[in-house]
Amino acid sequence: MFKILDKRELAPKIYEMTVEAPRVAKSAQPGQFIIVRTDEEGERIPLTICDYDRERGTVTIVTQIVGISSNKICAMEPGDSFADFAGPLGRPSDLLDIPLEELKKKNILFVAGGVGTAPVYPQAKWLHEHGVRCDVIIGARNKDLFTYVDEMSRVADVHLCTDDGSTGFHGLVTALMDHLIENDGRRFDHCVIIGPMIMMKFAAMNTKKHGIPTMVSLNALMVDGTGMCGACRVSVGGKTLFTCVDGPEFDGHQVDFDEAMRRQNMYRGNKKTNPETHKCSCHGS
């Protein structure tokens, strides 16, 4: 059993939990995920690892209420335990494969939409701990929906934007990207985008316009997390890959986003395989 030690509400219907999971914490790397079950009858839910503490033996996850299973997770309280907390799964961020001296020369941009801020945080934190600065664009519909802004500001240069102009830049993340590059003269060598699928599609189209190599973290349908079920298959550069074992990060300029979104929509209305409960809940919808 994996005990919940701490819980806090980050924004309406968005909760952070710190879970006692020493073996997962020992091996976790930025970009990886875990799969949880609330009880023996529970559904398998993939959640990105948002932080980890190897000494304390804890892993932090963020869940947004978007369906029955995520609602069940968010109803749990400190002292309750998950029946399963399997991981770390997936491949770590590709940034960890770049030699540190080369990484320090790069201007790295993260773009986080919705609750995609949480899975961006461990990558920005890892860079900060290794002496690498980065910029992070965080977008939300309004100021009340921001998460991890304070945490992110301690490890990166943060740029906020809102659809309604209630905080920061008034506009979408793509407009703020253009503003930084075209108006402020910023140059970026690498970009990582995490958020709703539609946001990642258009943000990746924007980085392609600017000639910036880009990785996206896909929140495709996922069931077993080992590549056996095939539910999370995606097309990347014309090849069929599996989000759970080949990703979750892929070249954003090679992903067939339209196909991925069609596959998500295939299950809408089906209570047994509702994409709201199978997708990586921390990425939003």
Image: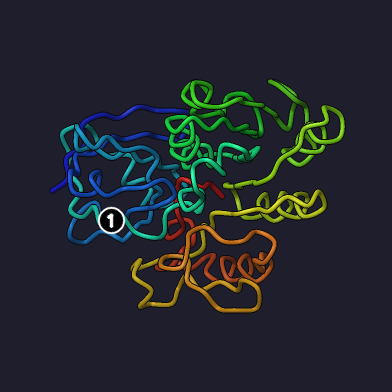
Q: Residue at x 21, y 61 (%)?
A: 41
* Residue 109 seen: no
Q: Secondary structure under badge 1?
A: strand
From the viewer's side, name the closer residue of 116 and 212.
Answer: 212
- Toward the left, the furthest residue is 1
From the viewer's side, name the closer residue of 227 and 278.
Answer: 227
Q: Amino acid at mark 1?
A: Gly
Which colour style is shown? Answer: rainbow
Whole-percent x, y for residue 177 in the image: 76, 37
Looking at the image, residue 266 sits to the left or right of residue 57; the answer is right
> Relative to 132, is 91 above or below?
below
Q: Residue at x 44, y 51 (%)?
A: 67
Dot 1 corresponds to which residue? 87
Looking at the image, residue 39 sits to the left or right of residue 188; the answer is left
> Relative to 236, is 118 above or below?
above
Label 1: few (<14), some or many (≥20) within 10 Å? Answer: many
